[in-house]
Amino acid sequence: MRIQQNSEYALYGNDKTQSTLLIDRDDWYYLVENKLRGPISELSMRKNFTDGFLNEKVLVRFGRSGTWFPAGEVPEFKSLFKSPNIFKGSSLRQFGKYLLIVVAVGLCFSVVKAIINKRQGNVVTNKNELTLSPSFQWGLTKSGVIAQTNKARQENGALPSLSENPLLNTIAEERLKDMFKNQYLSSHSPAGEDYTDLAGRVGYKYGRLAENIASGTFRNDEKVVDLWMQSPGHRENILSSDVSEIGVAVGKGFLKGQEVWLSVEILGHPSAGINNEQAIPLQWGLTKSGVIAQTNKARQENGALPLLAENRLLDAVAEERLKDMFKNQYVSHYPPSGEDFKELAIRFGYKHDRLGENLASGVYRNDEKVVDGWLQSPGHRAAILSSEFSEIGVAVGKGFLKGQETWIGVQIFGRPPAHH
């Protein structure tokens, strides 16, 4: 493996370094009469085809563990095989011979296609256990990248295999979508949410987190992991004894005008005592009862404060505030028109000595996330942990705010008069 600028592969790691790598192509194999030949260079392979020693039907592969393909389907050699000109020469007999050949080939193709369709895409295996995919397609798979990563760990120090984690898969998928959407390849998103931010959003609590990224025209899963293993930063992530879980996303699309494969690998280790597969449900969104429960949980964990009792009038105030913000497209304690929470409390007949309000908007995975966000803000935290409040009302809803689909959460805190 030699390093060259401006090659077809760009790799990134959490060490914030960039590498560009070029594959040495002296790693081709071919199969003749069930005998394996190679490795030889791409130039030697091309000479075998142009000299007529090999034809487009011979099975070839790149690398020791690559997938076998007919040479005529491989991009490097496809242009070497020309279709015969059936109109060459003036002899009608010669034309007829070519016509019969074309018809025979067409019939054979139809029979083979029918057999393949009947078998519903099952792979074909010869007596040497060489596997050939009916679609002859190159590319990456999530399960394959995970398997090749664990294979690399086994071959380099017999490190424990990484367990696939659904939350890390979600992080990888979000990163993949964002790179195609915003047309970049970096651990730092122009939209502002990197893989560590996503971990917080989806609820993956970690002691260690790392990311590997790759783009290019990869033949198989082994190739992309091999490339990472040639880069010190990516290799360190793969072979780290500090990670125990993995999530992967792969996809094909256009990046800056070029059709490429992107692969994202998220490697993590959960915080002590945390089971990230069970700690948080995989559904996104907020619930009124959940926000109240998480608020009371925070009060119990911070001074064992009395639990807040849900009040239906405060619920009504919160619901009116929620509707008004979606209707008038704002998030503020001060509505551009209409009533604020204090005025609504009076209209609904909630008599009080003390009243407070918390607001939040964003893409929240669950009720815990929105309450955690409030607890990080001094003003919101003071309202949640105030000993002067004894009742609560909540409203949550999902809708469009200034063109973006978002959740809004409203908390109304109150304390009725002593004689109430």
Image (tube, grey):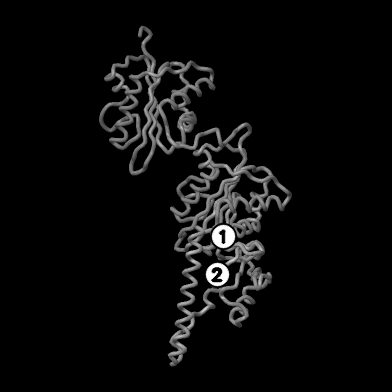
Q: Which quadrant would the N terminus be assigned to in this image? A: bottom right
Q: Is residue 201 visible?
A: yes
Comparing marks 2 and 1, which lies closer to the viewer? 1
Q: Quadrant of residue 55?
A: bottom right
Helix, strand or loop at label 2? It is loop
* Circle 2 Cα neighbour tier, 10 Å, few/some/many (<14 / 14–19 / ≥20): some
Q: Which residue is mark 1?
A: 123
As drawn, is 353 to the left or to the right of 206?
left
Position in image of residue 170 (x %, y %)? 51, 44
Q: Amino acid at mark 2?
A: Val
Helix, strand or loop at label 1? It is loop
Position in image of residue 213 (x %, y %)? 56, 53
In the picture, the disc for residue 147 is none
Position in image of residue 171 (x %, y %)? 52, 45
Q: From this viewpoint, which residue is outermost toward the top? A: 419
Q: Nearer the viewer, residue 363 or 127?
A: 127
Q: From this viewpoint, which residue is outermost toward the bottom? A: 90
Q: Are marks 2 and 1 in contact (CB under 8 Å)?
A: no
Q: Amino acid at mark 1?
A: Val
Q: Which residue is mark 2?
A: 74
Position in image of residue 403 (x %, y %)? 33, 44
Q: Nearer the viewer, residue 124 or 147?
A: 124
Q: From this viewpoint, which residue is outermost toward the right? A: 157
Calculate the distance from the C-alpha at mark 2 to the C-alpha at mark 1.
18 Å
Q: Residue at x 46, y 19 (%)?
A: 386
Q: In the rendered image of this protein, does residue 87 appear above or below residue 71?
A: below
